[in-house]
Amino acid sequence: MKRVALIIIIMLQALSLGAQKYMTRNGYIGFYSHTALEDIKADNNQVASILDIATGGIVFQVLIKSFHFEKALMEEHFNENYLESEKYPKSTFNGKITNLSEIDFLKNGTYDVTVEGDLTIHGVTNKVSAKGSLDVRSDGINASSRFTLVPEDYKIEIPGIVRNNIARSMEMTVTMKYEPMTVK
Amino acid sequence: MKSMNTFKLKKAHKIALWLVFFLVIGGILAGLYMYNLQDKDLQKVKPDFIMTATELQKAFETDETAAGQKYINKIIEVSGEVESVKEGETQTLVITLKTENSLSAVSCTMQAESVTQEFTAGDQVSLRGQCSGFLMDVLMNNCTVIQETD
């Protein structure tokens, strides 16, 4: 019910504001950890995100189980032990572009942006800030960003035995290809 | 007499040592095998459910919690019409199947190298994958194309 309500709200707003909202359902978020012992890499190509160019608002929704690891055992440990995805299936980000006035969405080009907001992972919410870039094009808006996250900030417990196999902070890469939201 | 007893003990000892040795080697090999296991090839795995994309999406739309309990982590063979084919990062292909709900679809990711045919919007296809959950669409991973046999 909540989901239907959310979709209806988005629809109504899209109708009233025209092409002010951009969306993707195939956004990419990946993370990478490098240690002398092991490299860990995971990719998620099913990130849902909405960008409102009128307010600068950005919302991300990520399904933890959609992170793909090359090794099945790593994926299992990630879900069952570290992120506890049965309990916390989704991660969300709710924030906005802080330098919205510097972006001209009517003029194609690349713009540096700073995004701030609440990031919730594993049931824990932290205020985060990240730099990225927006590529305004005729067919949509591409966004990319790289930042780091510390697992302990989100109460992700990594047992002592494997602590040295996992980096202190994870390198996150975000790549989104937004398209204008249209009502079909 | 004494010499016979010590000889027996030594032999049992030796057998025990060999047994331990093989168990340890076996354990290490099994561990390495498990560690390097990649996602199962679902071509060879029988699906838990066979349904249309519309049926699956509707289940989540009607009652997300109940549908989650029924379908998450299960192997589902879902059939439907291709809405879009997108290339993700890292050699991943994302095929989206249409449903009766124009706002919500079934999204399936797969390794690009495992897909041998070209898909375009409008094609009918059957995909077998593991259901991971629901955001705006029903999300499925480790999908494989099921060839029609008729």
Image (spheres, coloured by chain):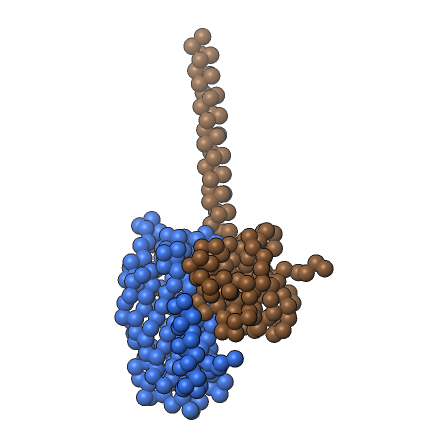
Chain colours: A blue, B brown
Q: Nearer the viewer, residue B36 or A63?
A: A63
Q: Position of residue A98 (x, y in %)?
A: 30, 81
Q: Position of residue A97 (x, y in %)?
A: 33, 80
Viewed as shown, does residue B137 lie left or right of B118? left
Quadrant position of the N terminus of chain B in the picture: top left
Dividing the picture into quadrants, the one containing residue A6 is: bottom left
Viewed as shown, does residue B102 lie left or right of A49? right
Quadrant position of the C terminus of chain B in the picture: bottom right
- Vertical side of B30 occupied by A87: above or below: below
Task: Name the residue located 44 percent from the left edge and 53 percent from the top edge.
Answer: A76
- Vertical side of A5 occupied by A102: above or below: below
Task: Report whether residue A165 is seen.
Answer: no
Q: Position of residue A32 (x, y in %)?
A: 40, 64
Task: Report whether residue A97 is seen.
Answer: yes
- Vertical side of B22 occupied by B88: above or below: below
Viewed as shown, does residue A56 lie left or right of B21? left
Dividing the picture into quadrants, the one containing residue B115 is: bottom right
- Name the residue furthest bottom: A107
Q: Position of residue A41 (x, y in %)?
A: 43, 62
- Name the residue furthest top: B1
Task: Name the residue located 39 percent from the left edge and 79 percent from the top edge.
Answer: A51
